[in-house]
Each structure stands twice: as C-alpha cells, then as structure tokens.
Image (cartoon, rainbow, N blue to C red):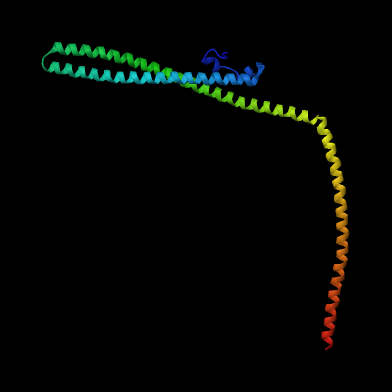
Amino acid sequence: MSIFSRLSDIINSNISSLLDKAENPEKMIRMVIQEMEETLVEVRSGTAKVIAEKKTLHRRAEQLRKQAEDWQHKAELAMSKDREDLAKAALVEKATVTATVELIDSELIKLDETLDKLASEIEQLQTKLNDARARQKTIVMRTTATQSRVDVNRQLHNFNIDNAMNKFEYYEKKIDLMEGQVDSFNMERRGLNSEFEELARKEKIDQELQDIKNKLSK
C-alpha cells in the first residue's frame, strides 16, 4: 500500500502528523522509509538517464558544429573556384545543420533546467529520508524503553521477588550479627595483645636503663 502518490507528496509531507495518526507508529515509519528509499532510487535512476541523454545530445551538437564548419570551408573553396552554385548549395547544407544545432542547444537548456529541479528534489527527498530514519531510531528506542519499564514494573510487583527480598534482609541481619561477634572477639584479642606488648616495651626500657646504670658504675 502506497503512502505517497508522487514525489511532491513526500517532499511536502509532515512525518510527525503521519505518525500521530498511525495506530502503529513503528510500522508506519518503516513504510515511510521504504517508500522514500524506493522513490529516491527511481529519481536518481531518472536523473542518470537525463544526464546520459544530455551527454549524447552534446556530442551530437559538437559533431554538427564540425559539419557546419566543413560546409563553410566547402562554400569558400567553391567560391574561390568560381563555383557559386556549389558555394550556395554548401551554405544551404550549413544552414540546415546549424538549425539542427540550435534545436539541440535549446533541448540542452531544457535538460539543464530539468537536472536542476531533479537535484533540488533529490536533496529535499534525502533530507526527508534522513529525518524519517532519525525518527525511526527514536521510536524504536522509546518502544524498547517502554517495554523495559513494563517488564520492570511487572517484576517489581511480583510476589516471588518480594518474598526473596524479605529473605535477603533476614540473611543480611544474620550475617551482620555473625560479623559483630567476630569483631568483638578480635577486639578482645587485640586488647590482650596490646597489654603484652606494653609489658614487653616496659621490660625493654627497664633493661636499657639498667644497662646504662651498669655502664656508669664501672
């Protein structure tokens, strides 16, 4: 099913309005992008044909200009030989060729105008396509995020999770109690060790003092 009937519909389209009216924005934006991409391929293909036709006409015009120059030279040659009849015939041929060149030049001007319009339309279409692709990424991310929120909320209100969290709290309190007992035991050991360390320090000081006394008494 086509969303757009012609290129101008795409260029003048309001993507936001299309998505607002769509029952399924994600599906709609995919369809919009697909049709834009297909249209862009068609327009570029048509542009390539116009460019090819322009090159063909340009080559034909150059060939005819050379023929016109050749007829001019022939006319001059005929006149130099006093063959006015041949000179006149050559100029008639030149006129015919020149008229054809003028027609081709006119066609080339029209083709240039067509190419300018196509270039502008392609640029506008590409801008629209880029916008649609950006919208698609946003819609996909929002859809994913919304689904994630739904899943999270469903889990938050899940009885099994609430029950498990209560068990976690029970085990955490139990572990806290065990850790407290270990810390208390370590504190007792540290206190006892500190007393022994203090005795050893005093004994060392007393010994050093006695050594000084013995040294002085000698």
Q: Position of residue 27 (x, y in %)?
A: 62, 20
Pick the quarter of the image with the C terminus.
bottom right
The residue depicted at 38 percent of the width and 20 percent of the height is 52
Give the vertical position of 129 relative to 196 (above or below): above
Left or right, 14 with respect to 155, comes to left
Left or right, 97 with respect to 195, comes to left
Q: Position of residue 17 (x, y in %)?
A: 63, 17
Give the vertical position of 93 relative to 203 (above or below): above
Q: How many marks?
A: 0
Question: What is the residue that sits farthest to the left in this orientation?
Answer: 81
Left or right, 169 with respect to 149, comes to right
Q: Position of residue 179 (x, y in %)?
A: 85, 50
The residue depicted at 43 percent of the width and 17 percent of the height is 114
Pick the quarter of the image with the N terminus.
top right
Q: Nearer the viewer, residue 92 or 164?
A: 164
Q: Quadrant of residue 157?
A: top right
Left or right, 147 with respect to 44, comes to right
Q: Nearer the viewer, residue 59 or 114?
A: 59
Q: Nearer the viewer, residue 31 or 52?
A: 31
The residue depicted at 30 percent of the width and 15 percent of the height is 101
Q: Nearer the viewer, residue 44 or 95?
A: 44
The residue depicted at 86 percent of the width and 49 percent of the height is 178
